[in-house]
Amino acid sequence: MMDTFSQDNDSNNQTDNTPPVRSLKELIDRVTGRSLSSLPQEDTGLAEPLPYPFLALVGQPELRLALILAIINPYIGGVLLIGPRGTGKSTAVRSILGLLPDVERSNCPFGCLPEDIETNGMDAVCPDCAKKYGQGEPISRWEPTRLIELPLSSQIEDVIGGIDEQGAMHHRMQLRRGILANADRNILYVDEINLLANEIVNSILDAAAAGAYTIRRGPISATYRSRFILIGSMNPEEGILRPQIMDRFGLRVLVNGLENPTQRLEVYRRVRAYQSNPRSFISEFAQETELAKKEIIQAREILPYVKISDDIALAGLNVIQTLQIQSQRAEHALFEAARAHAAADHRREVTIEDIQAVGRMTLRLRNTSWIEGSFDQSNEEILVKAFSSPPFSPLKMMDE
């Protein structure tokens, strides 16, 4: 990456003869392969949310990359994690909170933000917020990003919102926010998404795509923002998603159990250390986590300036055509993920290597015949071959 990262790393993290870290990927790979010192046991006392550190995850490079790209560029369209139980899907999702910066939240029940005024003027906010803003009083505050988990037992009213029953008892008809509105600017995690009712899944996907949704109940209505990063997970043994729903996810990751015995042993040791003394375990990764957070903030700032040349774009489109993928969401996910991959490396131009790095996770399971077949290895081999050269080359153009 750029020198800004290596300078911070040199002053804060480099010890002895350890070479400086030059990229976010290198930082993650180095930390996940590091041996831990023994930690004393601790009486944790009352329950407290202490997520497992993202940089403490072992193996699963595609899973880690997909989550990083999704939080750098929400326009990718979310992530779907597909794999059997016990492979660390939920742990990985919960761990990314440590990498996310604080976000601006409204102090107003109507969700007014300074950006509304900056974009559309004073008429874009409620009278109270317009007055406060004019007087120089804050109408928002900064808070940590939250992980909003959707319970499997959720009903449609829980998800989108509905009539406030307490208000109705006092003859005041008003709406209450649902899970989607509360997830604005947060991470929305939907475990076992393949077991949810279709109307709930459709509501989630529509709100995620539009960034806002409107709810109407009788004579009253309200529009809520829903600019969240969507992450879903599922066990294919319990049934697959309909192709129409599968197509809406930008990245698809096949999460399998680790095959390397050394890695499995390291997972056990890390989980044991985390359970024995979570605070000390988290502190072992605190410095690198802070560096990774700074890198992600910088990548988000660079992202709007990252471009894709026609040659690189045509190379990606050629693979999509070769794989006979009909959905035009394929190239959107491919190009947005490639832009995020370049931004993470502090570059403003997408390369063939960026397309190759994200190609499998963006195009996997987009061909209907693949979805109806299975999640077998032969489909992965097709993708590997598709992104080798030839035919994957910026010089090969699509047929007219």
Image (spheres, rainbow, N blue to C red):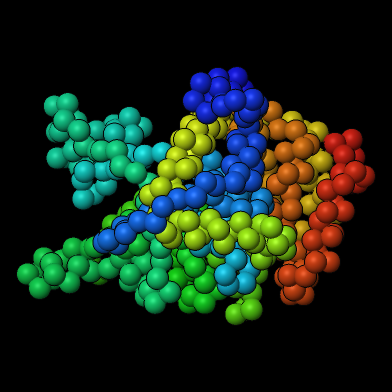
Compared with 124, 236 (above or below) is below
Residue at the spot 69% in from the left edge and 57% down from the top edge = 262
The residue lying furthest to the left in this view is: 170
Compared with 335, 93 (above or below) is below
Residue at the spot 55% in from the left edge and 22% down from the top edge = 10
Residue 182 visible? The answer is yes
Compared with 107, 193 (above or below) is below
Residue 80 image position (x, y, % from top left)? 59, 61
Displayed quadrant of residue 222: bottom left
Residue at the spot 75% in from the left edge and 64% down from the top edge = 367
Residue 203 image position (x, y, % from top left)? 45, 65
Residue at the spot 38% in from the left edge and 74% down from the top edge = 154
Residue 274 image position (x, y, % from top left)? 45, 56
Q: Quadrant of the N terminus?
A: top right
Compared with 353, 249 (above or below) is below
The residue lying furthest to the bottom in this view is: 238
In the foreground, 248 or 256 = 256
Displayed quadrant of residue 381: bottom right
Count of numbered tags: 0
